[in-house]
Image: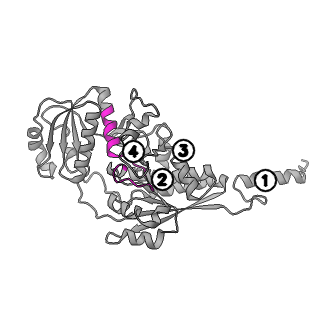
Amino acid sequence: MRPIKLCTQTIIQFFIIVGHLGGVGVVDAKPKQVVAIAYISQEQATPPALSNLDPIVKGKGLLGAELAISDNNTTGQFTGQQFVLKKFNVPPDGSVVDVFNKAIADKFSYLVSLLPAGQMLSIADLPAAQKMILFDAATTDDALRNEQCRANVLHILPSRAMRADALAQYMMKKRWTKWFLVVGRRSEDQLFAEAIKRSAKRFNMSLVAEKVWEHTYDARRTAQSDVAVFSQVDDYDVLVVADERGEFGEYLDYRTWLPRPVIGTQGLIATAWHRTHEQWGAVQIQNRFKEQAGRWMEEQDYAAYLAVRAVGEAAARTQSNELKPIKEYLVSEKLTLQGYKGTPLSFRAWDGQLRQPVLLSAPRSLVAVAPIEGFLHPKTELDTLGYDQPESHCQWRK
């Protein structure tokens, strides 16, 4: 066989192509542009086990961020960028502010926060944080998107109002308009109940009755005798439960006086992510995450993943690692973030909330995806969930 002869020009063109594809090229040898992202969380006290069926998952969020860094760097091979994630985990008795001031301030422009609302705001208000973007990947508080909003904070998870609206839209579709609301005694349960009441009013639902669960929280012992008596109210279509810690809500189903479905924080739930979701390429990321983590992706993992991917998308599009162009891109209409939910995601400029579809899931099946077909909006149907711009009380971002 005769040997193939390559001219010098052909060889040079080959190395140019290799260089553009991120290989070891002799032409494109300039150093990569580094985009550094900080990740902060704080170890929380392990709550008492409510069930032996579901293990307590620690470290939610970090593995999602690490998966996103890997995806960002895959793109970075073509854009000449390198993404780096630096992790800071504050001990339970440690100071989040001290860790931020010593290790993060003036060293990073992008911070993914898996902190509760109070700690997250304590960082957001620091002078050094005004020169950063904080991605809130942990909270669902409506107040943080309204009266307590901050100009330097973008929120990833759907707010309680978005979740309640998603449930209400599906109830409207089913014509299940009479609700019986059962509320726990914790502050977060009260906040979710307020979101439910707002949605009921917004979609013209009828609250037939509202009761506070005042029985023992060892619901396994009291469910058989207490729930049937407790749920004897006027006729209703669905029981809406506000029990964010899952202390009693699981034991309401099949035990009520009337045979009615349960929705809210148990039963049919509204969530950013769920292990039953497999459409629009979700099965691929589900499998990739499970292979890496050895468990299913949780909401916080998904939120941290989106936060890091948002930085990657903006950096790639602007070809910059600087705060100003990336922030402008993130809150502009140009951002089309892939979220594996059938439509591109973007941030609301007026409150920093990531607009996104909300999954309505039963424990072992995906029931629907909100916004439900038929609920229209002049700009995007995604803004039918939660606080729309005319309803917003956020002053920092206006």
Q: Nearer the viewer, mark 1 or mark 2?
A: 2
Residue under pointer 3? 335
Q: CA distance from mark 1 to mark 4?
A: 43 Å
Magenta stretch holds residue 167: yes
Q: Position of residue 282 (x, y in %)?
A: 47, 42
Relative to 232, say whether 337 is above or below. Answer: below
Mark 2 and mark 4 in contact? Answer it, CB < 8 Å: no
Label 2 or label 4, whichever comes before in sequence order: 4
| Residues in magenta, as a range | 145-169
Residue under pointer 1? 16
Residue 102 position by quadrant:
bottom left
Q: Nearer the viewer, residue 83 or 366?
A: 83
Q: Position of residue 177 (x, y in %)?
A: 24, 29
Amino acid type at circle 4 is Ala
Helix, strand, or loop for circle 2? Answer: helix
Label 1 or label 2, whichever comes before in sequence order: 1
Residue under pointer 4? 272
Give the class, few, some or many, for how many residues have Cα within 10 Å of label 2's Cα (few <14, many ≥20). many
- Residue 141, visible in the rendered structure: no
